[in-house]
Image (tube, helix red, strand yellow):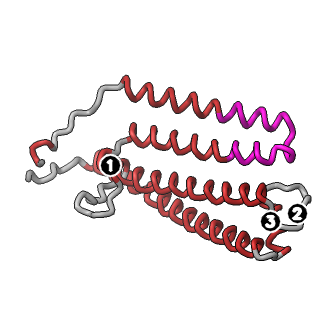
Amino acid sequence: MRPAPQLRPLPRLIFASRWLQLPLYVGLIAAQAIYVWQFWTELVHLIEAAFGNEHALELLAGSVGANGAVPGRLTETLLMLVVLGLIDVVMISNLLIMVIVGGYETFVSRMNLESHPDQPEWLSHVNASVLKVKLATAIIGISSIHLLKTFINAGAYEEKQLMWQTIIHVAFLLSAMAIAATDRLLPKPVHQDGADH
């Protein structure tokens, strides 16, 4: 293994500037912790509402935008909206993990997880292009959940809001298709680690 070449002061400073991104990833980890707290708070309210707690029922109805019409019990529609909200939190959390792990590995420093049993499958071939496509796919999934929640609770929204949410979702779909098509057109990098395997 050859020693790393010594960089001149200016290139070394520019290259070291990538570590300025570290606080951003630490901040995203803090946001992830807040999402975990949000998930468990909603789940506890859901369990309490299932056992007839009226205050928890009010909180759930308010969180899904029931516009003051609080049902006397946990209805199927309300349950579905809350569960979709929980799925939404999980998907955003997955998106955060992709950005934190993939972004750090791509733009800051290698994590050397090759021999780790829990290394995500996608991390072995991650680069900026793959990360972009994965993020676009995750955003479409999150947008789909939001749209489904809106259509289930359509009575609480104006027609214009429904229309714009649908248009924005279609725009996300078209953007992801454009990103994937562009990725296919770009030449694939040649891996030089074949000799190691």
Of marks 2 and 1, which one's residue comes earlier in the chain?
1
Residue bearing mark 1: 15
Identify whether 196 is placed above or below 37: above
Mark 1 secondary-structure assignment = helix
The residue at the point 84 percent across, 67 percent down is 73
Q: Which residues are magenta?
A: 146-169
Q: Is residue 161 above or below residue 33?
A: above
Q: Nearer the viewer, residue 97 or 31?
A: 97
Instruction: Give the Cα distance between marks 2 and 1.
Output: 58 Å
* Label disc, if present, on residue 71 of the rendered structure: 2
Residue at 32 percent of width and 59 percent of height = 119
Q: Position of residue 159 (x, y in %)?
A: 85, 35
Residue type at the position of mark 3:
Leu
Foreground: disc 2 or disc 1 = 2
Residue 159 among those drawn in magenta = yes
Residue named by callout 3: 74
Which secondary structure dominates the residues rendered in magenta?
helix
Look at 35% across and 47% down and name the residue there: 14
Answer with the quarter of the image where residue 92 lies.
Answer: bottom right
Q: Residue furthest top?
A: 185
Residues under labels 3 and 1: Cα distance? 56 Å
